[in-house]
Image: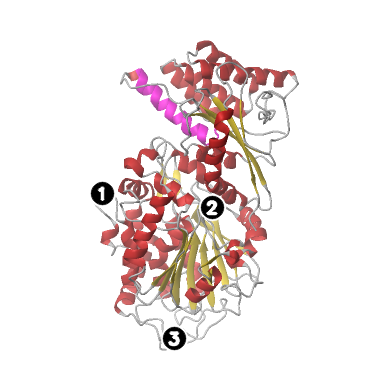
């Protein structure tokens, strides 16, 4: 199943100073992020590169990788994920970048064409089987990810599930609007959130199972950014997935 | 220039509506939508025939050709000059019934674009042409108020007009090439202008209609209310009714002036609001709620109705961007709680709707959003009043009531 990922970018680095380099980097970053939001991956890459040239902050490398991945250029995405991991100081995102690079490398080794959208195995609902491919889970899952910094957070499952259910109408809004031009298609959408211990949303992905619908996935991701997430009782990072099953409203 | 002429024209007509509250008492016996009955319309043998409507009701300012499409089937009508926010051309869908003298103009909803995330949410409706309309017509085109097979549908045999939503501006904007802060650039927020283009052909098509209902859901509900004054003026021979589904406005206390100011700036609302609604333009950006008493005063004999959930989670989301001095426009939205939304809605209801003779409301104990375009229209009942019955009273019996949980 081929899916486009809609994923949050890393936030801009602290560019509080008003040096010309900082100002220029900020301008390129803002332009790049707008292009990213529009799905104009090639142009987004160019702007992030300009931002990096102006101010060599590693986060730009991550965003370049994201743009390449979403644009289907997996070898370059791998290069920039690794480049980011090499330069990053934040262990969480460093690890995330390494994971992404490894997944893409595995994908390329299996013969994935270099210019396709990313394919990805589904995480399991079982906390200990995150890396094992499985059908889309029918219930929410808060799960461990391999590695020490994305440790398990099953304590969060109940509160997170309640939160998403409480705001289900908002996510449904995306599907309802999208389904006006795609009628009679049920929406099996999986939302994956990566949460910091304090509840800060680090990244968000949405995947529609039935068809390629990046605009719907972007809407779902944007909706996920509107929520306030609870802190983790165990103080650990959480990867939370929630499967929506939207039915076409007759 | 065309918009300017149009505004001047409808201003004249609206003025007469305010000073002649008993207009539209006896619309001309009508009529096929294919045969214009206005004495000013092309093809009429005797333009000098006495007109029962006020002299200022001049529909000749709508120069378009009447729409003629096959009867009783949805058909797409291109309007090459009408634009979506991505600059692509759009149009409208029509389902004409030559045996009916009533027409419902439905404005689609789907969020709005005024900062990064809101534009992403609205991206699902970035453009809309004949192909998208074909998909819509095949499914939703026979649901809810569009269902012509149900005897309890108040609109079952009406002429139906579908106005898609792809302008991202709640059908109220008139500003080109806008760069949205933190969002896309070069956006065409011209929904208000699009409505003007549609009226150029809809008015000649339905010039003598017995009744026109302007309705819409969500952003389309807001757009219906926003465009009501000009549509009522354009159809000055007809009884005109407003049915706003899930597009409320609220007082500045709830709908932050800074958020209203963003909308004004992005979509040029100050230019598209009726010129005679000075209080709609607050110095701090607020005041949009004053549109409600404006309509009450300007159209005292019309029926104006609003449907809303008392804790609508979608409108809460969008209004929530204005919380904490618009914190949500540059970071995480503080949101608007269901309690706050309900308080804001009840405030509007008690201050503007209940005291007026020409507003009615139907509130539902729910967090859901929009009601009239799906089966929920027929399954919803509040205090023993089914929603279709309330709508039927509004649009067909011209009686108003306020229903609430």
- SS of the residue under disc 3: loop
Tell if the residue under mark 2 belongs to the same chain as the one under mark 1: yes
Where does the image place residue B56, in percent across and percent down from the top left? 34, 78
Q: Horizontal placement of B159 versus B231: left or right?
A: right
- Residue at image coords 70%, 35%: A136
Number of the front mark, 3 or 2: 3
Which chain hosts label 1?
A: B
Please determine whether, in this image, residue A8 is positioned above or below residue B220.
above
First-in-chain label (3 vs 1) = 3
Residue positioned most to the bottom: B50
Residue A80 visible, this orientation: no
- SS of the residue under disc 2: strand
- Residue at image coords 39%, 38%: B181
Q: Which residue is mark 3?
A: B26
Q: Nearer the viewer, residue B31 or A85?
A: A85
Disc 3 packing (10 Å; few <14; some 14–19; many ≥20):
few
Disc 2 packing (10 Å; few <14; some 14–19; many ≥20):
some
Q: Which residue is mark 2?
A: B89
Q: Horizontal placement of B144 versus B217: left or right?
A: right
Cα distance in 3D space between marks 3 and 2: 38 Å
Magenta highlight range: A21-40
């Amino acid at each position: 199943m081929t899916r486009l990922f809609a994923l949050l970018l890393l936030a801009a680095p602290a560019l509080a100073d008003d040096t010309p380099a900082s100002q220029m980097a900020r301008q390129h970053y803002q332009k790049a992020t707008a292009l990213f939001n529009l799905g104009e991956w090639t142009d987004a890459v160019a702007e992030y590169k300009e931002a990096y040239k102006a101010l060599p902050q590693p986060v730009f490398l991550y965003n370049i990788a994201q743009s390449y991945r979403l644009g289907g250029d997996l070898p370059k995405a791998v290069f920039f994920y690794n480049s980011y991991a090499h330069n990053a100081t934040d262990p969480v995102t460093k690890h995330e970048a390494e994971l992404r690079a490894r997944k893409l490398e595995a994908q390329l080794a299996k013969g994935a064409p270099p210019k396709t959208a990313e394919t990805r195995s589904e995480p399991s609902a079982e906390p200990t089987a995150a890396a094992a491919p499985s059908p889309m889970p029918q219930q929410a899952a808060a799960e461990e990810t391999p590695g020490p910094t994305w440790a398990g957070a099953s304590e969060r499952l109940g509160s997170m599930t309640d939160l998403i259910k409480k705001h289900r109408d908002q996510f449904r809004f995306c599907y309802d609007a999208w389904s006006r031009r795609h009628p009679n298609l049920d929406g099996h959408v999986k939302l994956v959130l990566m949460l910091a211990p304090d509840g800060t949303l680090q990244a968000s992905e949405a995947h529609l199972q039935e068809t390629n619908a990046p605009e719907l996935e972007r809407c779902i991701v944007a909706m996920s950014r509107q929520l306030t997430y609870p802190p983790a009782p165990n103080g650990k990072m959480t990867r939370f997935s929630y499967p929506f099953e939207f039915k076409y409203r007759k | 220039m065309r918009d300017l002429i149009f505004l001047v024209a409808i201003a004249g007509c609206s003025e007469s509506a305010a000073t002649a509250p008993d207009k539209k008492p006896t619309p001309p016996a009508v009529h096929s939508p294919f045969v214009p009955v206005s004495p000013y319309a092309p093809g009429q043998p005797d333009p000098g025939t006495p007109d029962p409507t006020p002299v200022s009701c001049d529909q000749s300012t709508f120069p378009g050709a009447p729409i003629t499409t096959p009867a009783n089937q949805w058909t797409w009508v291109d309007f090459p000059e009408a634009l979506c926010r991505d600059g692509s051309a759009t149009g409208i869908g029509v389902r004409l019934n030559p045996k009916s003298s009533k027409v419902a103009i439905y404005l689609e909803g789907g969020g709005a674009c005024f900062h990064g995330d809101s534009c992403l949410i609205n991206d699902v409706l970035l453009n809309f042409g004949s192909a998208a309309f074909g998909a819509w017509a095949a499914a939703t085109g026979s649901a809810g108020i569009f269902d012509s097979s149900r005897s309890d549908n108040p609109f079952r045999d009406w002429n139906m007009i579908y106005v898609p939503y792809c302008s991202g501006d709640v059908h109220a904007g008139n500003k080109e090439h806008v760069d949205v802060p933190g969002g896309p650039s070069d956006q065409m927020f011209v929904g208000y202008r699009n409505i003007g283009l549609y009226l150029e052909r809809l008015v000649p098509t339905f010039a003598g209609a017995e009744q026109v209902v302007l309705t819409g859901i969500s952003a389309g509900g807001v757009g219906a209310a926003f465009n009501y004054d000009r549509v009522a003026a354009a159809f000055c021979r007809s009884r005109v009714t407003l049915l706003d589904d899930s597009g409320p406005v609220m007082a500045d206390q709830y709908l932050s002036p800074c958020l209203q100011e963003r909308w004004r700036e992005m979509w040029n609302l100050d230019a598209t609001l009726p010129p005679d609604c000075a209080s709609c333009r607050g110095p701090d950006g607020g005041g949009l709620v004053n549109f409600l008493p404006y309509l009450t005063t300007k159209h005292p004999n019309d029926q104006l109705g609003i449907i809303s959930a008392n804790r609508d989670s979608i409108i809460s989301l969008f209004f929530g961007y204005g919380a904490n001095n618009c914190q949500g426009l540059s970071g995480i939205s503080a949101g608007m709680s269901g309690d706050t939304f309900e308080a804001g809605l009840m405030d509007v209801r008690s201050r503007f709707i209940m005291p007026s003779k020409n507003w009615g409301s139907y509130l539902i104990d729910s967090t859901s959003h929009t009601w009239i375009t799906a089966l929920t229209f027929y399954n919803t009942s509040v205090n023993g009043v089914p929603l279709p019955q309330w709508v039927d009273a509004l649009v067909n019996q011209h009686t108003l009531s306020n229903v609430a949980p």
